[in-house]
Amino acid sequence: MFDIKEIYLPKDLAEALAMAEAHREAVVVAGGTDVLIKVREGKLAYCDLLSIHGLSELKGIEENANGDLLIGPLNSFRDLEEHPLIARHIPILAQAAATVGGPQIRVMGTVGGNVANGVTSADTASTLHVLEAKLLLQSAASQRLLPLGEFYIGPGKTARQPGEILTKIIIRGAAYADSGGCYIKYAMREAMDIATLGCALLVKPDKSGQHIAQMRIAFGVAAPVPTRCPKTEAELAGVSIGEAVQRIAGLARAEINPRDSWRASKEFREHIAGVLAERALVRAWQQALERRPS
């Protein structure tokens, strides 16, 4: 039994944007795997819901002439796992999607909902962070393109304004070209558990295949919001892969700011962050070399 005051069911995106403007207090719901749980628990009891679940305009994954990937927010985690464009260009995102919940959740839950909820434990959020994703936010009157790093403003809080709907996730071709990636999730259970800590890493070797040309690393549950480690990235640019593997754990631990919780202590999360960073770098580097044209 769900205590819902009103549910709005637009037939297309234009109507959804009009409804979002007319009912600015309504909670946007896609797959419902997070929102409906909050309704059932009483956190959103007797709220209005605006369901965008059936809007075909917000589905699909495309590649434009520049090699940019345009991802609809209503793609499920299973869609990300299985789509050939994701597998070809950014398998790190498929890897992250595969760690979410169980099979039922991955069929129903959406990448847009995972991002828009604003939680630091979202598995796709840190991954999209290293891919330097941009979010297209639309309202009935305007639209704006916001870097994912600017979307999160606090625990469970985002920069999305009342009346706005996330309508596209954009990943530039230049952000993933000639790179390998890895996402590793540490949780108390091996399956169907939220992350105690998550680490996403994308690395681009130089032409020699011996040094790092560029690296980006981000963590979930290592700060109030999904967070990049720019100092670590800058320190390891131009460094040999052997030296980088030796140094990355200490650099990453010094830059993050996890908290104590019933799931894990701050000290434990710091320890795990270093271990995951080192493993992710080794795996991402190997993938980058394997994906190089022969």
Image: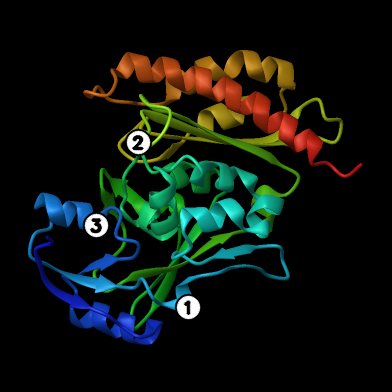
Q: Nearer the viewer, residue 158 or 4?
A: 4
Crowding at mark 3 (Cα within 10 Å: few <14, some 14-19, many 20+):
some
- The picture places residue 270, in percent across and down from the top left corner, at 40, 18
Q: Name the amino acid, label 2.
A: Ile
Q: Nearer the viewer, residue 49 or 132?
A: 49
Q: In the rendered image, which residue does mark 2 sit on? A: 194
Q: Quadrant of residue 21?
A: bottom left
Secondary structure, mark 1, is helix
Pointer 2 local density, CA inside 10 Å: few below 14, some 14–19, many at least 20: many
Element under label 3? helix
Quadrant the N terminus occupies: bottom left
Residue type marked 1: Glu
- Secondary structure found at label 2: loop
Q: Give the residue displayed 51% in from the left and 15% down from the top.
A: 250
The disc at residue 57 is: 1
Residue at the image position 86 percent from the left and 30 percent from the top: 208
Task: Indicate which disc, 2 or 1, sits on the residue closer to the N terminus.
Answer: 1
Q: Which amino acid, by three-letter code, is at mark 3?
A: Val
Horizontal side of 20 relative to 66 (left or right) equals left
Residue carrying label 3: 35
Residue under the point 18% across and 52% down: 38
Residue at image position (72%, 66%) is 66
Q: Is residue 152 left or right of residue 56?
A: left
Spatial CA span between label 2 and label 1:
30 Å
